[in-house]
Amino acid sequence: MSETETLLLGQVLDIHTDPFATAPEAAARHERHGAVLIRNGLIAATGPAEALRAAHPRARMIDHGAGLILPGFVDAHAHYPQTAIIASWGKRLIDWLDSYTYPEEMRFSDPAHAGAIAARHLDLLLAHGTTSVASFCTIHPASVTAFFEAAAARNMAVVAGRTCMDRNAPAGLCDDARSAHDESAALIGAWHNRGRARYAITPRFSPTSTPEQLEALGALWAAHPDCLMQTHLSEQEDEVAWVRALYPDRRDYLDTYEAHGLLGPGAMFGHAIWLSDDEHARLHDSGAALIHCPTSNTFIGSGLFDTARAKREGQVVGLATDTGGGSSFSMLRTMASAYEVAQLRGSALHPAQLLWLATAGSARALRAEARIGTLETGTEADLAVLDLASTPAIAQRAARAETVWEAVFPTIMMGDDRAIAATYVAGQCMQVPEAGDHSRKVNPLIADSLGL
Ligand code: GUN
Ligand code: ZN
């Protein structure tokens, strides 16, 4: 037996099949007294605690009691440079970008600022049970380096890219087609597939790129098809009208990307709300992913993404915070918001569907489902352990639960970082609770960046 075996004990909830494609409860296996065996950073087995204890008597044991062991959350779209301006009051998209976002992003020319915010962002994610993120950076290569370095220091599997803009933004945040291409190419060489990192070619969105820049980035993606591509699509109606005016020769917003080689498997389109039927069909046929950012969509007043429709169509759908347009770092809060938005569109998402979107669904959007987002044997041991009674209000509701779904749903709807009992990255515990003191749950190893 290897010295490095660890056995986590707790409730284990394994959503092994897409719960939109089958009856949600049939998509999951729940083990009330379960265990996850970790060996060399990978999930080596899951199953009943008794059987795994008997088979691995010398494994180091960590008992999470009634804690619910899940895959770590995967945030499929975020802006780490907006960490410090989250929850800025009172603007719609374009105004919000001009007033809050761009002035803050200017500061990322300073590598020290970029490094401090990257560390803070990733530690906030770990404190919220999120183990992977696809993040935009800023136009500054140093902002990308800082983020990948901070992720490597935590051994986190992240996706990130240099945000490219060559018009309709402050001069200090604008590049041109060539520098966007060349600096992105250099960062791909430095970071793509280095350790757990992967690179996403990142035009911010069509209004801030010339057709020449989109063409250059499309060519770059063709040269590096194994990279991802992330951008924004059809978030607000005003934005769609603006794109129509800026690109009179393109048939619709999606075509501004499609015509330049930026539509295909591995493309991740944030928001994707105001789409025609034809755009829906082309997105589906391309294998691209739609990234649902519900707290952002309600916070900035963008609109109501139709999750049920997208999944019925067979789209790849990921779930994301979109911080700082989104109003929370928590994927629990994001699931609650997705539930509420779906209710307003006439469907009630099952807890299995919400949890799947936040783990395997987002992992699929990142084209990483073979490595993260599930409890499958052989995948990387990125895990979140939920305390299903983390506040008195949640505890009193969960006490009445008769099924695991009833037990977990109050935490989805009302939970926050207090519900995260532990976070594991590649088998290493990054976040540990101190009994009875919810304000001090952050591992001292990562507390510095939060100023705690
Ligand atoms: N569209 C272009 N840039 C952004 C951004 O930073 N946040 C959001 N929510 N939408 C965008
Ligand atoms: Zn965004």
Image (spheres, rainbow, N blue to C red):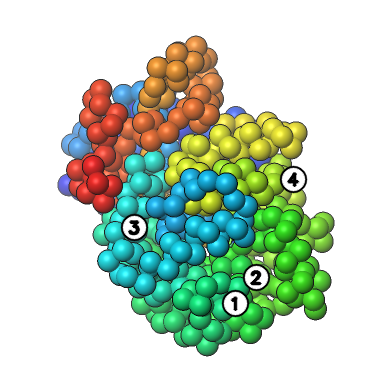
Residue found at x 69% / y 47%:
303
Which numbered disc flags the more N-terminal residue, 4 or 2? 2
Q: Is residue 304 above or below residue 226?
A: above
Please name the amino acid that badge 1 sits on. Answer: Arg
**What's the CA distance linking mark 4 and mark 3?**
37 Å
Question: Of circles 1 and 3, which is in front?
Answer: 1
The residue closer to the viewer here, 104 or 148, is: 104
Q: How far apart are the two marked residues, 3 and 2, measured between alpha carbons? A: 27 Å
Circle 4 sits on which residue?
309
Ligand 1, what quadrant? bottom right
Give x and y (percent) for residue 377: 41, 47
Q: Extreme bottom residue here? A: 178
User: Could you tell me which secondary element the residue under label 1 belongs to?
Assistant: loop
Q: Is residue 198 left or right of residue 448?
A: right
Q: Are marks 1 and 3 in contact (CB under 8 Å)?
A: no
Which residue is identified by label 2? Answer: 207
Q: Are marks 4 and 3 in contact (CB under 8 Å)?
A: no
Above or below residue 388? Residue 167 is: below
Query: Vertical placement of 317 versus 228: above or below?
Result: above
Residue in the picture at 34% in, 59% down: 118
Asked if the residue at label 2 sits under 8 Å from ligand 1, the reply is yes
Q: Earlier in the sequence, mark 1 or mark 4?
A: 1
Looking at the image, do the residues carrying marks 2 and 1 touch, with CB atoms under 8 Å apart? yes
Secondary element type, mark 2: helix
Q: Earlier in the sequence, mark 2 or mark 1?
A: 1
Picture quadrant of residue 452? top left
The circle drawn on residue 117 is 3
Disc 4 vs disc 2: which is toward the camera?
2
Q: Which residue is mark 1?
A: 167
Q: Marks 1 and 3, Cα distance to the nearest angstrom?
A: 26 Å
